[in-house]
Amino acid sequence: MKVKDVMHSDAIWVGPETPVAQIEAKLQADDAGAVPVSEFDRLVGVVTRKDLARCGTTGAKRLTARDVMSKPIIYCYPEEEVAAARNIMHKHAVRRLPVVSHQKRIIGSVTIGDIAG
């Protein structure tokens, strides 16, 4: 089975100028550990709860996604096998993985629950 067969096409993402406080609220509301950062429809980074914890509260009101996002970016392609996506998720200890085109445009996401097995 391919990732495209189980992915969600309504991926949650933020722009690089999104304030950290707004990202924190989005992660909490969606019960997510990370949110992709997209600029002009292209994946440019990911903000994790760990990234937010590292920035602390000092100056956090001025920080944006661009200031705190993680690299390297972890993602998969829609034509990959589900087992390959599962391995990526386990290797990097993530529950949600952006699905991107070969031009790195976000086209969806897949969660560990979608591909458990």
Image (cartoon, rainbow, N blue to C red):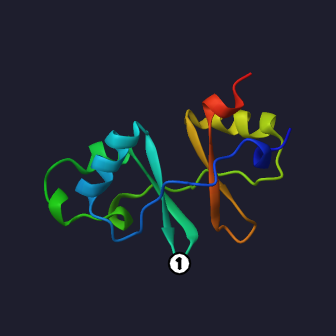
Q: Splitting the image into 4 quarters, where does residue 43 fall?
A: bottom right
Helix, strand or loop at mark 1: loop
Which of the 4 image quarters holds residue 84?
Answer: top right
Neighbour tally class for label 1: few under 14, some 14-19, many 20 plus, Cα within 10 Å: few
Q: Position of residue 70 (x, y in %)?
A: 46, 54
The image shows residue 16 at horizontal and vertical percentages of 40, 69
What residue is drawn where x is 49% and y is 54%?
Answer: 12
Where, quadrant-wise, is the C terminus in this rendering? top right
Image quadrant for the N terminus? top right
Q: Residue at x 42, y 68 (%)?
A: 15
Q: Nearer the viewer, residue 99 or 72?
A: 99
| Spot occupied by residue 19 in the image (x, y as percentages of width and height) | 27, 63
Say if 14 sits above or below 17 in the image: above
* Residue holding disc 1: 40
Q: Is residue 3 visible?
A: yes
Q: Does residue 60 appear to the left or right of 82 in the view shown?
A: left
Residue 22 placement: quadrant? bottom left
- The answer to whether residue 50 shows anywhere in this view is no
**Residue at (34, 49) in percent of width and height:** 26
Q: Is residue 24 above or below residue 22?
A: above
Rendering coords of residue 36 (x, y %): 50, 56
Count of marks placed on residues: 1
